[in-house]
Each structure stands twice: as structure tokens, then as C-alpha cells.
Image (cartoon, rainbow, N blue to C red):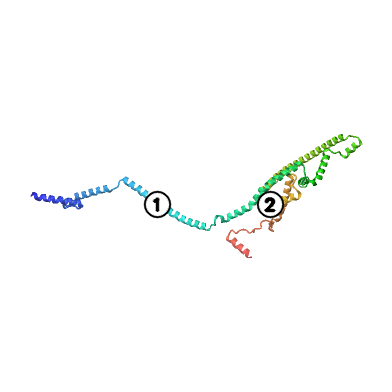
């Protein structure tokens, strides 16, 4: 029966194609399995175990897969943690920014404008007060320098205040009232002739009138005497000026020595007296009063002696103001004032002490 078998073969092929397309097993596939399972259970179990082993083998990950997966999880955890921290920090920064912005806004609202700020107004007021002083200094500085130059000129010329004032008065009269200044200038001229020997002294005039000397010889003698007198006066003035300069230099040197000696004395005192800070202002005040009353010390030793005397006087005053310590009164029996009763050593001693105290 060839046609029947061919028809069955065609139906089986169609059913296999349909099963392959739809994923549903066909009857022919199921029947051999049923027959095989029914015929040999051990073969079925072996087939199932082998299929499960193949599936486990396919599904079990390798060591490389485990390591890669662990690294990926670690990277994912770090990235998520950093993202969370970044998010928190960004949120905190935004919150702080909002707070700072609000505080700054309030502060800006409270702050006055720059030109109305109290500190700015104070600075401007101080500058306003100092500006006239600056102008005064700029104006007075050249005048002070000119006055110093004039004083130096007067001192070097050997003039005093009256002579300077008289010379300015004559020069003013020459400019404004020349007629009135002529007699004044003639008087100066006569004095200059006598000072230079161009006029004869009364003694020389008498000698000329008596015929002892002629007038020309008398005039020459008069001029010689005048030059000698001027030279002696100039020498005296130079010597006086040198003495003044020497005295000023000596005074400066003495002042430096006094300051150095008193400073050294003050340094020693500050290291030896624990109450130095309490006494130093009073001592300095008394030293200044002493100098104003009696003048500066002549030597450094005298300065130290004055300072030491004033310090001792201040120490005596401090001792009077210090509280007096009460002396410790000794006990009448002489010795320690503590009780001489022995300490109890037993219960009987305690009872005896109690009875003695009650008696």
C-alpha cells in the first residue's frame, strides 16, 4: 500500500513544519518519547540528566563573567554614591546660597550709600579739619626757614636784638622819610669815624695843639689804635662765641650721659623691685618736679643720686601704706598651742576621754 504511506509521510512532514513554525511538538515527536519512556525508564532519566547538565553548563557563568559583573556593580555603586553626594552637596550649596543671598540682601538694604556711611563722613570731617592745618604748614614752613636763616646771620654777625631793631628802623626811615633819617645817619657816621681813627681823640688833639706831634702823625696813631681796639674786640667776641659753642657741646654731652645713666639705673631698679610698675610713674613725676625747681643735674652721678633719693622716699611712703602683719601669739605653756591630749587607742580610751570631757 504505497499510496497510504506516502499520504502519512506528507501529513507528518506538514505537522513537523507546523510544529517548527509554532514551537508546539508534533504527535510523532511525542510518541517516540512516550514509547522510549515507557520502554526504558533509565534511558529517560539519563536523557533528562544530560539535558539538565547541558542547560546548567550553558547557564553557569564563567570566572571572567563573575569578575566583570563584580567590577560593574562596584562602579555602579560608586557612581550612584557620588551622584547622591553631589546631589546633596549641590542642594546644600543651593540652600546656603539662598541663605547668603537673603542675608546679603538684608545687609545691603540696611547699609547706607557709600557717601552716607558714618565712617566715610568721619574721614571727610577729619580731612576738612586737617586741610587748613596742612595749608598753614605749607605757608609757615618757608617763613620758619627764613627766620632761622636770619637768626643765624644775626648770631654770626654779633648783633643783639636792639641793634637789629634799630637797623630795621633806620632802613625803613630811609625808604619812607629820608629827611628825618639824615641826622641819624650823621650820628652813625661820626661814631664810625671815631671807631676807625679818622677823628682824633681829645688826648691826641691836646698833643697836636701843644706841638708834640703833627696832625698827620696823630691821625696815623689814631687809626693804629682803632685797628688794635677792633682786633681785640673781635678776638674777645670770637673767644666768647667759642666758649658758648663749647658750653653747648658740653651741655649736650652731659645731657646724653645723664640720660644713659638714669636709664641704666631705671633698668636695674625694674629688675630688683617687684612693685616697680606701681612706683615708676610717681618717681618720674618727682624727678621732673626736682629738675624744674633746682635745674638739671650737672653730672650723671648727681642725676643718679637724685633719682635714688626720690625712689627711697617713695619706698618709705609705700611701706606706710602697706598693711601691717599681726604677730603670732605663742601659747601660755610655751610650745605648740595644739591640745596635748593623746589620741585614743582602744574602746576603753574612748570611754575615758568621754567621761573626762563630761567631768
Of residues 313 and 341, the one nearer the viewer is 313
SS of the residue at dot 2?
helix
- Does 224 sit left or right of 58 as displayed? right
**Looking at the image, is mark 1 or mark 2 earlier in the sequence?**
1
Crowding near the residue tagged with mark 1, few <14, some 14–19, many ≥20 C-alpha atoms within 10 Å: few
Query: Residue 236 location in percent, x, y?
Result: 80, 39
- Name the residue located 37 percent from the left edge and 48 percent from the top edge: 75
On screen, residue 309 above or below 358: above
- Name the residue located 40 percent from the left edge and 51 percent from the top edge: 83
Query: Residue 98 location in percent, x, y?
Result: 46, 56
Query: Residue 56 location in percent, x, y?
Result: 26, 48
- Whether residue 43 is visible, yes or no, is yes
Report which residue position mark 2 lands on.
281
Report which residue position mark 1 lands on.
83
- Does 275 sit left or right of 171 as displayed? left
On screen, residue 64 above or below 126: above
Of residues 257 and 356, the one nearer the viewer is 257
Of residues 324 and 307, the one nearer the viewer is 307
Amino acid at each position: 500500500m504505497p499510496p497510504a504511506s506516502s499520504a502519512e509521510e506528507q501529513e507528518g512532514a506538514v505537522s513537523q513544519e507546523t510544529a517548527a513554525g509554532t514551537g508546539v511538538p508534533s504527535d510523532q515527536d511525542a510518541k517516540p518519547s512516550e514509547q522510549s519512556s515507557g520502554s526504558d525508564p533509565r534511558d529517560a532519566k539519563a536523557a533528562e540528566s544530560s539535558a539538565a547538565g547541558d542547560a546548567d553548563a550553558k547557564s553557569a557563568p564563567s570566572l571572567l563573567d563573575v569578575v566583570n559583573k563584580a567590577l560593574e556593580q562596584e562602579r555602579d555603586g560608586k557612581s550612584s554614591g557620588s551622584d547622591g553626594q553631589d546631589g546633596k552637596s549641590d542642594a546644600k550649596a543651593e540652600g546656603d546660597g539662598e541663605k547668603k543671598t537673603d542675608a546679603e540682601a538684608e545687609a545691603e538694604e540696611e547699609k547706607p550709600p557709600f557717601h552716607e556711611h558714618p565712617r566715610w563722613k568721619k574721614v571727610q570731617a577729619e580731612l576738612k579739619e586737617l586741610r587748613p592745618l596742612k595749608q598753614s604748614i605749607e605757608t609757615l614752613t618757608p617763613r620758619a626757614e627764613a627766620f632761622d636763616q636770619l637768626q643765624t646771620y644775626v648770631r654770626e654777625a654779633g648783633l643783639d636784638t636792639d641793634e637789629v631793631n634799630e637797623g630795621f628802623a633806620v632802613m625803613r626811615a630811609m625808604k619812607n622819610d629820608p629827611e628825618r633819617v639824615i641826622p641819624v645817619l650823621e650820628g652813625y657816621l661820626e661814631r664810625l669815624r671815631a671807631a676807625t681813627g679818622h677823628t682824633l681823640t681829645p688826648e691826641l688833639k691836646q698833643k697836636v695843639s701843644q706841638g708834640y706831634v703833627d696832625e698827620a702823625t696823630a691821625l696815623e696813631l689814631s687809626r693804629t689804635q682803632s685797628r688794635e681796639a677792633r682786633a681785640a674786640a673781635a678776638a674777645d667776641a670770637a673767644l666768647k662765641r667759642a666758649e658758648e659753642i663749647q658750653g653747648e657741646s658740653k651741655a649736650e654731652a652731659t645731657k646724653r650721659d645723664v640720660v644713659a645713666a638714669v636709664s641704666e639705673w631705671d633698668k636695674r631698679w625694674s629688675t630688683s623691685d617687684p612693685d616697680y610698675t606701681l612706683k615708676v610713674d610717681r618717681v618720674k613725676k618727682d624727678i621732673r618736679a626736682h629738675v624744674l625747681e633746682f635745674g638739671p643735674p650737672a653730672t650723671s652721678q648727681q642725676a643718679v643720686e637724685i633719682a635714688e633719693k626720690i625712689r627711697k622716699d617713695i619706698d618709705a611712703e609705700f611701706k606706710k601704706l602697706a598693711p601691717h602683719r599681726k604677730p603670732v601669739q605663742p601659747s601660755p605653756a610655751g610650745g605648740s598651742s595644739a591640745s596635748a591630749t593623746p589620741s585614743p587607742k582602744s574602746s576603753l580610751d574612748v570611754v575615758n576621754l568621754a567621761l573626762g570631757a563630761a567631768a
